[in-house]
Amino acid sequence: MPNPMKRLDSCRARALLFLALCLPLAAIADNPAPDVLVRTTTDDVMRLLQEDKDLKAGNPARVVGLIEEKIVPHFDFARMTKLAVGRSWREATPEQQKALVHEFQTLLVRSYATAYTAYRQIKVDVKPLKLAGGEDDVTVKSQILLPGGAPPVGVDYSMGASPEGWKVYNIAVDGVSLVTTYRNDFGAQIQQGGLDALIRSLQARNSKPVGQARK
């Protein structure tokens, strides 16, 4: 007659083995690989742009809301701001740093919304990434395929690993770094009027309607 205790121990062992096998799968589901994250997020946003009536009409507030919901959680705006401000970041007070991150994030969200509104018919091809074990900083390459046979635009996402998953901290469009471009702009403003002048400038740009923030 089978020993019920042995059968119970066997069932427990199988259950533990099942959990051990499932845990890595759960981790993958919660923290997808960086290229998978870029691809799924982009596909989701582009699908909504095609299906949502307000988004199709180019409603600025609705587009900004979409960006904040779907894209903002995957960006490390604090790191982006620190890189864009450069050496002057160390001289900023905690209040100035907080204001800079807030205003820079707002500016980038509005710029992102403008780009999506202007190019709703694009397709995005995210290239597969070979992720080596232990890597915590990668570049995900993609191409934006424009309508009408226009040349594709290369977009590279610099991403770092974090406890909350992979986060974008820089974007390069056709080899031009967003962080470097803003660092040059911010550096000139800081040199002329200091960090407070830069904050006021960002606030002024963010007070304009979506689509005019760069002017």
Image (spheres, rainbow, N blue to C red):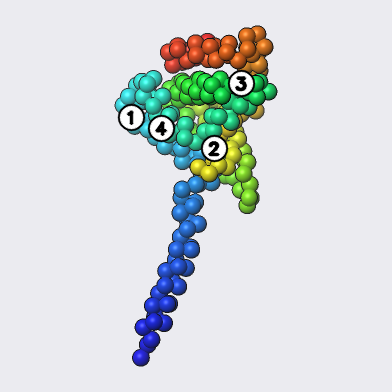
Q: Is residue 132 above or below residue 188?
A: below
Circles 3 and 4, Cβ within 8 Å, touching? The answer is: no
Spot the residue most to the top: 192
Mark 1, mark 3: which one is toward the viewer? 3
Mark 1 Cα within 10 Å, few/some/many (few <14, many 20+)?
few
Circle 1: residue type: Asp
Which residue does the numbered mark 2 point to in the structure image? 167
**Residue neighbourhood size for the residue with mark 4, other residues' Cα within 10 Å, grouped as few (<14), some (14–19), many (≥20):** few
Residue 136, image x and y in percent?
62, 44
The residue drawn where x is 43% and y is 13% is 209
Rounded to the nearest angstrom, the CA distance separating label 4 from label 1 is 15 Å
Viewer-side residue, 52 vs 66: 66
Q: Earlier in the sequence, mark 1 or mark 3?
A: 1
Q: Which residue is at the front of the view, 50 or 100? A: 100
Q: Secondary structure at mark 2?
A: strand
Residue underneath mark 3: 92
Residue at the image point whose x is 45% and y is 73% from the top: 13
For mark 1, what is the residue?
52
Tell me which amino acid carries mark 4: Glu
Q: Position of residue 204 (x, y in %)?
A: 49, 11
